[in-house]
Image (cartoon, rainbow, N blue to C red):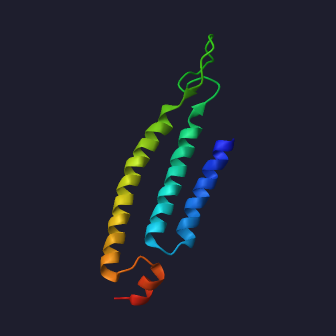
């Protein structure tokens, strides 16, 4: 249960950075932190303490160790690749904005208009 709470705290930290910070790089880091929290949560949900794989309909006779559902792991691997691509795109856009306006501050970028 503690791991789920820590995932929520990490996600909240990422959303806080996105909503409160005015620097584009800090906003980008907040998005990355929130994305990592969601990936960690999906990996934690995949753990099966009862030791029964989701494809086994009945409880086996022998006692099995805890297992992990492979489907969320496949989703997390896909999410990592997509997250890397979107992070690279956001970083490239932030660099172009810095080249044009000379600042990462959102308030100054809104005032320039041009």
Vertical placement of 29 versus 55: above or below? Answer: below
Q: Residue at x 36, y 65 (%)?
A: 91
Residue lying at the far right of the rendered structure: 1
In the rendered picture of this protein, how many numbered marks are placed on residues? Answer: 0
Q: Residue at x 60, y 49 (%)?
A: 7
Looking at the rendered image, the quarter that the N terminus falls into is: top right
Q: Residue at x 42, y 42 (%)?
A: 77
Left or right of residue 78, residue 9 in this image: right
Looking at the rendered image, the quarter that the C terminus falls into is: bottom left
Residue lying at the far top of the rendered structure: 61
Left or right of residue 3, residue 111 in this image: left
Rendering coords of residue 19 (x, y %): 56, 70
Vertical placement of 110 versus 8: above or below? Answer: below
Location of residue 109 by image quarter = bottom left
Q: Residue at x 36, y 70 (%)?
A: 94
Left or right of residue 20, residue 94 in this image: left
Rendering coords of residue 76 (x, y %): 46, 43
Rendering coords of residue 14 (x, y %): 55, 60
Vertical placement of 100 versus 63: above or below? Answer: below
Location of residue 98 by image quarter = bottom left
């Amino acid at each position: 249960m503690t791991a789920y709470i820590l995932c929520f705290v990490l996600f909240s930290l990422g959303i806080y950075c996105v909503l409160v910070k005015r620097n584009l790089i800090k906003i980008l880091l907040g998005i990355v932190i929130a994305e990592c929290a969601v990936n960690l949560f999906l990996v934690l949900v995949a753990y099966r303490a009862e030791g029964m794989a989701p494809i086994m309909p009945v409880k086996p006779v022998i006692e099995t160790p805890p297992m992990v559902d492979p489907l969320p792991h496949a989703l997390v691997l896909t999410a990592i690749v997509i997250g890397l691509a979107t992070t690279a795109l956001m970083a490239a856009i932030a660099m172009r904005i810095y080249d044009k306006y000379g600042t990462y501050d959102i308030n100054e970028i809104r005032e320039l208009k041009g």
